[in-house]
Amino acid sequence: MVFSSLVFLYLFLPINLIFYFICKNDTYKNLVLLCFSLLFYAWGQPFYVLLLVISTLINYYLAILIDKYKETSKSKLFLFLAVFFDLGLLAYFKYYNFFVENVNLVFSTNITLSKVGLPIGISFFTFKIITYVVDVYKKEVEVQKSFNKLLLYVSLYHQIMSGPIVKYKDMENVLVKREINVSEFSYGLNRFMAGLFKKVMIANSVGAASAVFLESNLNEISILGAWLGIIMYTLQIYFDFSGYSDMAIGLGKMFGFTYKENFNYPYIAKSAQDFWRRWHISLSQFFRDYVYIPLGGNRKYYIRNIFIVWMLTGLWHGASYNFIIWGLYYGIFLLLEKYLLSKILNKLPRFISHIYLILVVIIGWTFFYFLDISKAFEFIKILFGFAGNPLYDVKFEVEFYNNVILLVVGILASTPIFKILFEKLDKNLNNNKVANVLHGFVNVAILIICTIMLVGQTFTPFLYFKF
C-alpha cells in the first residue's frame, strides 16, 4: 500500500483516524497505530511483518542488556551484537546476491543466488533501530521497557517505507504522551495534500515524460532529447521523494508526531556540500552521526572518512556498482570543493555557482538512473555531443511542446517561490477563517484531481521504496 493509492486515501487513512480519535488515552491510541502500521506493512508483504517484529524483539532485549551492563565491556559487546545483527539482516536481504554475483564472476564459482525478495523499507527501519541501540549505549536516551512502544517506533507506517529516518531520541517523549490540536491537524492535512500534489500531479507526470527518452534506444535520441529526459528525471526524483516526505510529515502532525524536515529545496543550492545539507537530510545526518564522526570526522583521516561515508551512501541506495559510483562521485566533489572549488565558487556570482551545482546533480542522476554503467557513460557522451547523435529530432519537439508547461511548473515548484507566495497570501488575508476556507478548497481540488489521475494511471510506487 502506498500513500498515493485510492485504498489508502479513501479507506485506510479515514478508518485509522476514526479509530485513533475515539480512543481516550495515548495507550489505546498507540495500540491502534501499531495495529494499523503492521497492517499497512503487511498489505503487500505479509511474511516480512514477522521479520520486522523479530528484528525489533531482538534489539529490544539487546538494548535492555546494553543498559543493564552500561559502562562495562559487556555493554559494548551487546551493542556490537545488536549492530552486527541489524547490518547482517540488511546485508543478507539487500546485498547477498550482489556479493555472490561478484564472487562467481571473479572466482568462476557457481554459488546459488537467493530467491528471497527485498523487504520494503528495510534500509529505513534498520537505520532507525540502530539509532536506538547506539543512543542507549551512549546514554543519550532511556532504554524503552515497553516492547509495544519500541515496535510502534520501528513500524510506524508514516515513515517506515521511505523515511525520513526518524531517530528514537526525537520520538522518545511523544511515544508516551502527545497532544493534538486543530491547528496542528490542519497543518498536517495541508502538508499531506501538498505531498500528494507533488507525487501524483508532478512526479508521475514528469516520470512518464522522462521515460520516453531514458528508456529509449540511446542511438535513437537527440542531444536535446537526452537533456529533456534527464531534466525530467531530475524533477521526478525530487518531487517523488520530497512528496513522500511531505506526506509522512503531514501524517505525523495529524497523529501528534513531529518529524524533522527531510528536504529544503536542494535544487537552489550552489555547491555539492550545500546540496547535501538540503537533500535527504535525515540520511546525511545518520551517516554523519553514526559513521563519519565515529571514524574521526574532519579531525583525522578526513579523506578516508569521506570516501567511506560516500561509498556507503551510494551502496545504501542499492546493491549495484552504479550506486557506488554515484556516492563516490559526490565524495570527490565534496573533496574538490573543500580544497579547491569553494574558494572559486564563493567569488563567482550566485547564478554561476548554481549552474555548476545543477550540472553536477544532473550528471549524478545519470549514474543513479542507469544500472548499466557503460550505458550511463554513453548517455553522458550524448548529453555533451560526443556520440554523434543529432541536436534535436521530431520526438524532442513533440515531447517538449507537450510538456513545456509541466516543465516550467516543476522547475518553479522546486524553488521556494510558491511557498513564499502562499505565506504572503495567508498574511494578507489576516483572517484565519478565510485562510482555512482557502486551504480547504485547495485540498479538495487536489484530492479530486489526484483521484481522477490515479483512476487512469497504472500503479506507480515511490522511487525510494526499492531502497
Image: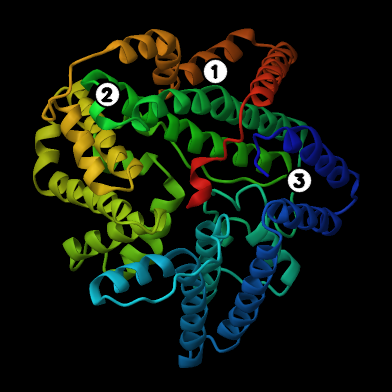
- Would you call the spot at circle 1 few (<14 residues within 10 Å), some (14-19), or many (20 or more)? few
Q: Is residue 35 visible?
A: yes
Q: Nearer the viewer, residue 1 or 412?
A: 1
- The quadrant of the picture occupied by the N terminus is top right
The mark closer to the camera, 2 or 3, is: 2
Q: Looking at the rendered structure, which numbered label has been put on residue 166? A: none
According to the picture, the residue beneath numbered tag 3 turns out to be 179
Q: Secondary structure at mark 2?
A: loop
- Would you call the spot at circle 3 few (<14 residues within 10 Å), some (14-19), or many (20 or more)? few
Tell me which residue sits at (26%, 64%) in the image: 308
Tell me which residue sits at (57%, 40%) in the image: 461
Residue 40, image x, y percentages: 72, 51
Q: Quadrant of residue 318?
A: bottom left
Give the mark, 3 or 1, whose residue is nearer the N terminus. 3
Give the mark, 2 or 1, whose residue is nearer the N terminus. 2
Residue 284, image x, y percentages: 38, 52
- Would you call the spot at circle 2 few (<14 residues within 10 Å), some (14-19), or many (20 or more)? many
Q: CA distance from mark 2 to mark 3?
A: 55 Å
Q: Is residue 143 visible?
A: no
Q: Is residue 463 above or below residue 205?
A: below
Q: Quadrant of residue 196?
A: top right
Q: Looking at the rendered structure, which numbered label has been put on residue 221? A: 2
User: With 415 as the anchor, is 437 left or right in this view?
Assistant: right
Residue 123, image x, y percentages: 50, 59
Q: Tell me the amino acid under the disc marked 3.
A: Glu
Residue 269, image x, y percentages: 30, 32
Q: Secondary structure at mark 1?
A: helix
Q: Looking at the rendered structure, which numbered label has been put on residue 423? A: 1
User: With 385 as the anchor, is 402 left or right in this view?
Assistant: right
Q: Nearer the viewer, residue 201 or 352?
A: 201
Q: CA distance from mark 3 to mark 1?
A: 25 Å
